[in-house]
Image (spheres, rainbow, N blue to C red):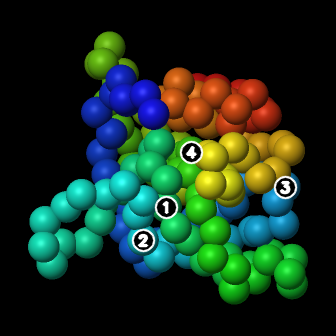
């Protein structure tokens, strides 16, 4: 997996509810834990754009609800700084469901994804509406 080119402010934690922006059948997902997170003892994981999380589907199609899935965070409300000095923020916190190989489950993503996600996961960027 490629490294991030920006300094991402990590503001999402376990217990955060994200909007699912793909057409996989899930509408809202609840973060249970983080994948590949190394932290300090007794400290919860801090997550941001480009992180893969383990989530539970809260709203969506009946066959998807209560299912534990992997999700990729593609947008966050809190601004983050890019290397050229520009600060980027989105209007919502959003995720896309991915499989074990980090390929998207859905075939279409509503809305844009961050450029940092597009660099790290090119298949997600290929089905998105745009890259910011």
Residue beneath disc 1: 53
- How far apart, in angstroms, are the residues tagged by discs 4 and 2? 17 Å
Count of marks overlaid on the render: 4
Residue at 43 percent across and 28 percent down: it is 2
Q: Tell me which label, 3 or 2, sits earlier in the chain.
A: 3
Q: Quadrant of residue 68?
A: bottom right
- How far apart, in angstroms, are the residues tagged by discs 1 and 4? 11 Å
Question: Which quadrant of the figure contains the N terminus?
Answer: top left
**Residue 7 horizontal side relative to residue 16, left or right:** left
What is the number of the mark on residue 23?
A: 3
Residue beneath disc 2: 33
Mark 4 lies on a secondary structure that is strand
Residue 71 visible to the viewer: yes
Q: Residues within 10 Å of mark 3 (few under 14, many from 20)?
A: some
Mark 3 lies on a secondary structure that is loop
**Residue 30 horizontal side relative to residue 96, left or right:** left
Observer-side mark, 1 or 3, equals: 1
Residue 105 x/y as whole percent: 77, 53
- How far apart, in angstroms, are the residues tagged by discs 2 and 1? 6 Å
Q: Tell me which label, 1 or 3, sits earlier in the chain.
A: 3
Residue 4 x/y as whole percent: 37, 30
């Amino acid at each position: 997996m490629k490294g991030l080119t920006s300094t991402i402010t990590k503001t999402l934690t376990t217990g955060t509810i994200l909007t699912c922006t793909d057409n996989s059948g899930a509408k809202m997902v609840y973060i249970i834990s983080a994948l590949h997170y190394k932290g300090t003892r007794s400290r919860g994981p801090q997550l941001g754009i480009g992180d893969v999380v383990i989530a539970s589907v809260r709203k969506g199609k009946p066959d998807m609800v209560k299912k534990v899935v992997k999700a990729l965070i593609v947008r966050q409300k809190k601004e983050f700084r890019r290397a050229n000095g520009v600060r980027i923020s989105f209007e919502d916190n959003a995720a896309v469901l991915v499989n074990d190989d980090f390929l998207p489950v859905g075939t279409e993503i509503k809305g844009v994804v961050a450029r940092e996600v597009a660099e790290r996961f090119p298949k997600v960027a290929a089905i998105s509406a745009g890259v910011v």
